[in-house]
């Protein structure tokens, strides 16, 4: 069968995409674990990460690592500002209102980026040479390995933060048991504030690693954000492992689907998977701490 | 209080007194309906700057027939609904003689239909596509090189390079698909074998690896000589990047939409060796010395650099050409300039020299440029280099 001959290559490409979705999904999960807020500006953190690095690298003439570090710092600052200016004033509002607020923030960030940085797409050079290498008839680009490595490192550090540090536990407590957190003297607003910073940092790292593979445009945050959100829901809303698993499942299924259906439907596959999951297993593959499993 | 009343009365008298004097120099009004915001904002800004620069130059030297030109800008935000609304607004303003824009292919069908109904000339920057061409609309004119001449030029290029078998990977929109179809039609007339891929891509796709993975066995099994990326915008460099990352080393052909600096910046090394038929402004400094459009381009580029500080490009060139075409037609209009009079004279344009080439319209041909107005270009060392073949331009 001819179809089977290109499955390995599609698998590799799917894994790369999976790592990207997972990275974006991790950002969603970080905020959700601290506050149950769904931050739809997450995709824009990714876009800003790529965009800032591009301008620090080409405009300010910084070296690649330095530009990357500064970009992450700036985006973390934007994440903090987003909390202070949008989320904090609305702290007494209900979740749907916060959701609308983050959507508005997303539009604001992408339009501002269009005004400041222009509307033409931008790309970063790869970290190492461009040439891809062949392994068993499958070509792999070094940048994909970097994306995989970044996903793994970010997962490790987030896992360490939430399971091994007091701060991470306090962040989680402020979401799962607000009253308990208040009684133990944890400032929930501070925890959400920090979560926004961490999630902006994760998003911008994703942006820096994936921009050399694709390109960044002022509106590219929207679709990648949606895919990351689907990944997080698919794997189990609110679990780091869930976002990673969901990301890889989504990336691989999407990529493999091209072998069997016309590629025009590729983006639709993600949403079909989301609908199926919401219908048959709303708590996701790994289960979600926020969704009461007894009801399902 | 009294003072204010007197001031108002006085200003009224002055205005009514001056108005008739100005009437003699009422401007020719041109509506401009462009995608000034949205994904093409930067490109349309270049066009806007070029239009403004040319209109100011003409007005400074006395205008056309002693009357100045005036541009009225409306932003359609890359939205069909707003493009239609702007067009309708312009048609209701009796002083607007003609409408320029839109810039993108997917908006032109709408504005053309309105132009036809309301009987106002609509000059469109992008090429026509077969769907709108078949309607044989009287009031619409296209500036850019049509899909037909680009495809003919590409077949010439393929034959000169002795490519026997080509694989086309089109984007899923009318213009790209018709470029693919015409390439197949003209190519097969000349004895080539052209395979149009069943896989397509969308203008918004950021990665074509899955589609190209599916095409890789076809390229190897059929021993395809050349890969033709029939697309525009960011997908062009993405296709080249993904192809090279998959280890496919066959030559790549592109469309005339590859002739932008940002395309090379996006694709980087993967763009090396890509060849395509391009508009003349892309490589204006490398044109033959006897090419009539060379001095126009050099002069335009000089003025552009003085004013905006960046090198000019093919989009800025369209700005020069449209204003030139309009003032050329206005000069030929006898008596009072009306919408229909201007349309008839625009259709009579014979060999207007612009930056892109010699524009020629006729009742049957509303695409101004011909095959002679394109050159072959190869990307080398991150630059557009003109290539020539004996017997072909």
Image (spheres, grey):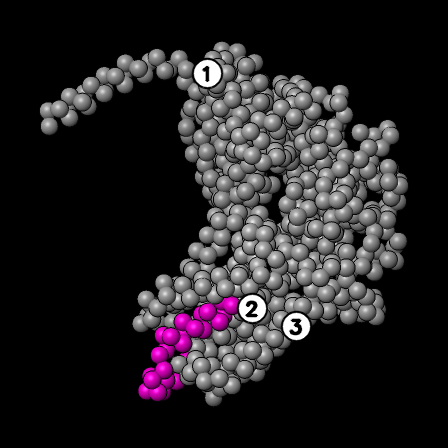
Q: Main secondary structure of the magenta part?
A: helix
* Residue B74 image-quadrant placement: top left
Q: CA distance from mark 3 to mark 1?
A: 67 Å
The reply, left or right, for residue B379 in relation to residue B337 is: right
Identify the residue shown where x is 52% and y is 49%: A117
Circle 3 residue: A149
Q: Quadrant of residue A14?
A: bottom right
| Residue, disc 2 | A24
x, y percentage for residue B157?
A: 82, 38
Find residue B12 and report its image quarter: top left
Spatial CA distance of label 2 from label 3 is 14 Å
Residue A247 visible within the image? no
- Mark 3 and mark 1, same subunit? no
Which residue is identified by label 1?
Answer: B67
Q: Residues within 10 Å of mark 1 (few under 14, many from 20)?
A: some
Q: Is residue B196 visible?
A: yes
Q: Position of residue B93 (x, y in %)?
A: 41, 28
Front of the two marks 2 and 3 = 3
């Amino acid at each position: 069968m001819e179809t089977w001959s290109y499955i390995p290559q599609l698998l590799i490409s799917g894994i790369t995409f999976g790592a990207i979705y997972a990275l974006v999904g991790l950002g969603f999960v970080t905020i959700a674990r601290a506050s149950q807020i769904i931050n739809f500006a997450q995709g824009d953190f990714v876009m800003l990460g790529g965009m800032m690095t591009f301008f620090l690298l080409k405009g300010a003439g910084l070296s690649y690592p330095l530009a990357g570090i500064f970009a992450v710092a700036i985006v973390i600052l934007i994440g903090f500002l987003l909390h202070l200016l949008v989320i904090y004033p609305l702290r007494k509002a209900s979740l749907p209102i916060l959701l609308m607020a983050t959507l508005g923030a997303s539009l604001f960030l992408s339009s501002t980026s269009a005004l400041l940085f222009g509307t033409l797409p931008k790309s970063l050079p790869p970290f190492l040479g461009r040439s891809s290498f062949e392994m068993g008839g499958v070509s792999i680009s070094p940048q994909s390995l970097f994306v995989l490595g970044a996903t793994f490192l970010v997962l490790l550090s987030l896992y360490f933060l939430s399971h091994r540090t007091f701060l991470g536990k306090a962040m989680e407590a402020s979401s799962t048991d607000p009253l308990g957190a208040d009684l133990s003297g944890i400032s929930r607003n501070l925890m959400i504030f920090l979560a926004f910073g961490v999630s902006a940092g994760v998003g911008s790292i994703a942006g820096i690693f994936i921009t050399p593979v694709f390109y960044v445009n002022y509106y590219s945050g929207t679709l990648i954000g949606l895919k990351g959100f689907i990944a997080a829901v698919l794997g189990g809303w609110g679990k780091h492992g869930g976002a990673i698993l969901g990301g890889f499942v989504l990336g691989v299924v999407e990529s493999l689907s091209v072998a069997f259906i016309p590629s025009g439907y590729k983006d639709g596959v993600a949403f079909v998977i989301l609908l199926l999951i919401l219908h048959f297993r709303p708590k996701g593959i790994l289960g979600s701490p926020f969704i009461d499993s007894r009801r399902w | 209080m009294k003072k204010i009343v007197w001031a108002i009365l006085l200003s009224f008298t002055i205005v009514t007194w001056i108005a008739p004097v100005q009437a003699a120099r009422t401007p020719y009004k041109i509506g401009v309906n462009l995608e000034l915001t949205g994904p093409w904002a930067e490109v349309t800004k270049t066009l806007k700057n070029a239009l403004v620069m040319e209109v100011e130059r003409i007005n400074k030297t006395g205008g056309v027939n002693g009357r100045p030109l005036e541009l009225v800008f409306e932003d359609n935000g890359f939205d069909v609904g707003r493009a239609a609304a702007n067009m309708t607004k312009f048609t209701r303003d009796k002083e607007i003689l003609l409408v320029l824009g839109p810039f993108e292919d997917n908006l032109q069908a709408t504005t053309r239909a309105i132009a036809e109904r309301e009987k106002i000339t609509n000059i469109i920057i992008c090429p026509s596509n077969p769907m709108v061409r078949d309607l044989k609309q009287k009031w619409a004119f296209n500036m850019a090189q049509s899909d037909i001449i680009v495809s003919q030029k590409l077949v010439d290029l393929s034959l000169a390079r002795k490519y026997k078998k080509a694989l086309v990977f089109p984007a899923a929109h009318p213009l790209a698909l018709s470029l693919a179809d015409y390439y197949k039609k003209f190519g097969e007339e000349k004895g080539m074998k052209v395979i149009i891929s069943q896989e397509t891509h969308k203008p918004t796709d950021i990665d074509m690896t899955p589609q190209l993975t599916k095409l890789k066995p076809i390229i190897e099994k059929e021993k395809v000589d050349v890969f033709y990326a029939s697309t525009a915008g960011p997908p062009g460099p993405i296709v080249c990047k993904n192809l090279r990352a998959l280890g496919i080393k066959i030559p790549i052909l592109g469309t005339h939409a590859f002739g932008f600096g940002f395309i090379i910046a996006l694709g980087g090394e993967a763009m090396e060796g890509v060849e395509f038929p391009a508009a003349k402004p892309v490589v204006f400094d490398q044109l033959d010395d006897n090419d009539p459009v060379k001095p126009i381009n050099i002069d335009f580029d000089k003025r552009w650099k003085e004013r905006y500080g960046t090198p000019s490009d093919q989009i800025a060139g369209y700005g020069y050409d449209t204003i030139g075409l309009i003032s050329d037609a206005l000069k030929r209009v006898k008596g009072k300039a009306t919408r229909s009079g201007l349309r008839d004279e625009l259709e009579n344009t014979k060999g207007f020299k612009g930056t892109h080439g010699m524009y020629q319209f006729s009742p049957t041909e509303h695409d101004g440029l011909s095959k002679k107005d394109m050159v072959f270009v190869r990307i080398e060392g991150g630059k557009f280099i003109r290539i020539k073949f004996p017997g072909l331009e």
